[in-house]
Amino acid sequence: MAADGFLRFQNVAKSFPGVRALDGVSFQADSGSVHALMGENGAGKSTLLKTLSGVYRPDAGRLVIGGVPQTFRSTADAIRAGVAVIYQELHLVADLSVEENLYLGHLPNAKGWVNRRVLRENALRQLASLGEDISPSTRVGRLSIGQRQMVEIAKALTRDAKIIAFDEPTSSLSAQETDRLFRVIRSLRDSGRVILYVSHRMDEIYALCDATTVLRDGRHVETFPSLKALPRDTLVQRMVGRSITDIFSYAPRPHGKVALEVDGIAGPGLAAPVSFSVAKGEILGFFGLIGAGRSELLKLIYGAARRTAGTVRLEGRMLDALKPSSSIRLGTVLAPEDRKKEGIVPMRSIAENLNISARRHFSRFGFLINPAMERQNAEQYVSRLAIKTPSVRQLIRNLSGGNQQKVILARWLSEKPKVVLLDEPTRGIDIGAKSEIYSIIYQLAREGVAVVVVSSELPEIMGISDRIMVMRSGKVSGVVPRDQFSAERLLNLALPITDHEDTRVAV
Amino acid sequence: MTMPSPNLDSLTPDVLPAGPVRALSPSDKANWLRGLWDSAGMAVILIALMVVLSLTVPNFASVANFRGLALSVATVGMIACTMLFCLAGGDFDLSVGSTVAMSGVLSAVVSNATGSVTLGVAAGLGAGALVGLANGVVIARIGINALITTLAMMQIVRGLAYIICDGRPVGIQSDRFWGLGINSFAGLPVPVWIVIVCFIAFGILLNRTTFGRNTLAVGGNPEAARLAGIAVTRTKIIIFTMQGLAAAMAGIVLSARMTSGQPATAQGLELQVISACVLGGVSLTGGIGTITGVVVGVLIMGVVNNAMNLLNIAPFYQYVASGAILLAAVMVDRFKQSYSA
């Protein structure tokens, strides 16, 4: 289809207190094409989608759809204008049926009485058009994530959406579900709709998208009308503002004596006892699929879950830590997997989150806190780890994921730990912040700290580990030293033995 | 663009440099202004309210009236201090009104029976602490929802209050006991001194101790707090025990003021206390709360009630007014949040 610029952003700007989220963004997307929106976290993609969906009103600039300038006062306005945004967290009512969700807000009715028969017929038709055979009477709560996404797409179609935007749609889909989604997106494109597609996964962008727009720090960097013959490095460089070839910049270090010795540890989430040891200065990676038992293992070591057998020694001393506080006191710390749920206290400040544990070191009599020292400690780490914030009193929930993670790391660095357990330390973090976190990990190792990293990202775990233990279904399936790292070998150890297809690894 | 690269010279310094405090950047100032509005918005409303009432309500602006006002908020004030911890810690306590009645009655009975005010007071405080401890253990260790637990406890303890005195008010014989409610010291009634001390002590506890900061973390995100090494269960049990103690103290002082232990007193007090906290900006979902906010919340409620009494407004209308004020305050808060989000 012709490059018609059906959807145009013209100098769109939006600010929040202390942040310029969008700074005069202009670009256009054509009907009949899948247009990727790329950029690091905090680049402005989400804000852009929210101005498109009517959640935010731009401070300046405007949206033009099909040649008509739009001012959305509400999400309802955007829906009327033919915009549908499918967010990562789907907006469906779990307790209602599929058909009721599809026509939520515009159920076929006569004077308020719902016409069930028409509803059922329409729903069946919409689902069939996507090639879905979900029963319209199923409760949405019983559907898989992939199916729910299809329902969300069908819902957009019932409203005759001309522009459909997807925000990281594959983050919790299996490979098969992703393939299905891509087929559906392509058919939506072929029917002449504008598709906006936000993702961090390069493979997907290249497989699916026709054009791409790169944002950085709320500004439009460049729009590439075609992805053919566009090198990945170029794209990454536009996103980050520099080349990223040396993102891992691994260098071997000398290892010291054994720091952490885990012997026959068992507990919930593990199918067999696990034993291993980590030396001072060593970075030990744990690779495996989600649910392979790696996070559970870390929590058992840390004392956040109750172990049923086994011992943990820290520098030869038995660590009978059955709760996190004793682990911390002895020098083992854990940065958990789910930052939002397990890491941060969102409505408290950076300083508060950072000093949550270490404040006891500078409290008088162990309980009277020292505000000056706390502030100093926080400010020091904010500058050392380059945490982007106007002040340590900023609420942590206002930071980007990468900066939140740095605060969590700072929380544990202030404890001067001997063993650092990191569970998916860079999940959902943009490339720039990732490489900064790797530098922090290397620096810790150089200082003689034993580091255990759990990651599902193959390039990452291969990039930073000295040695990788692979887990599969709650057991250790192999140990690979650095000189034998290969994606194939690691994947073979990680994948369920029967099924080699159903797994993708993020790049 | 150049990425700010972390300064990794040493990540774990042994000595913290005693650098000068950074100058305020513009955004710091913006934050500070917003912080002022966040924390002092209600205080401004309180002051405006007092100015208006002084000008319009006869006898409002008098020393005698302010003393009466202070006395009238003492009970709510004492309990609000610990309710602050309870709410900020992510929980809820509906049993305080019953605890006030029960401990007042128990103190009266024990002090009459033994002839010792000390023993009476100790019995009341002990019983209150036990109620709080029971709440805390059931909620934090067994994991029952705080609303249900304290709703049940509210009824159990109210029942106990009636059982202790067989349903009849117990006149207190000792005039030394009365003194706890009636005597004055340096021009202020004893209950007012007690509530002032409570505000200061719990303010220090919240702002300047690890326990206070842990409370906010536990309320803000219990799982994160646990993984950061905070003893979540213990923190919650301590909070509820303190809450029981504070309610008992308020109950004893109240019975002293009435010179009798009344099993039917303080019905619905828990809601007044929670209202005052919410007026003061304490979050019902935990993690947010300040002592100054609570002081302001308590005073706003007190001032409004006091003015309505002076204006001879019938109690029925006062209920409506109190509810409306609470609702308005919460809506203002809501508006403030969506504005700053």
Image (cartoon, rainbow, N blue to C red):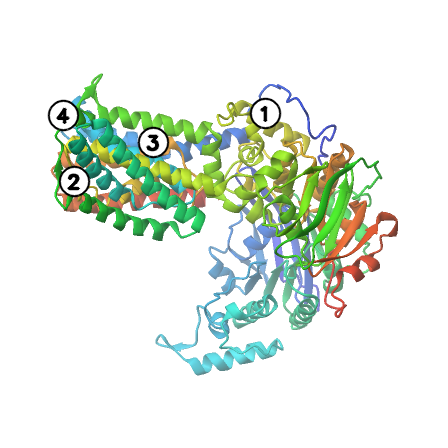
Q: Residues within 10 Å of mark 3 (few under 14, many from 20)?
A: many
User: Hey, what amino acid is under mark 3?
Assistant: Ala
Q: Identify the residue at image location x=60%, y=18%.
A: B20
Tell me if residue A57 comes above or below residue A390 in the rendering. Answer: below
Viewer-nearest of discs 1 and 3: 1
Viewer-nearest of discs 3 and 2: 2
> Is B107 displayed left or right of B215 in the figure?
left
Q: Which residue is mark 3?
A: B43
Q: Residues within 10 Å of mark 2 (few under 14, many from 20)?
A: many
- For marks 3 and 2, the one nearer the N-term is 3
Chain of the residue under the numbered disc 3 shown in the image: B
Q: Which residue is mark 4?
A: B175
Q: Which residue is mark 1?
A: A376
Quadrant occupied by the N terminus of chain B? top right
Residue B208 image point, x, y percent? 46, 27
Residue A382 occupies quadrant: top right
On the same chain: label 4 and label 2?
A: yes
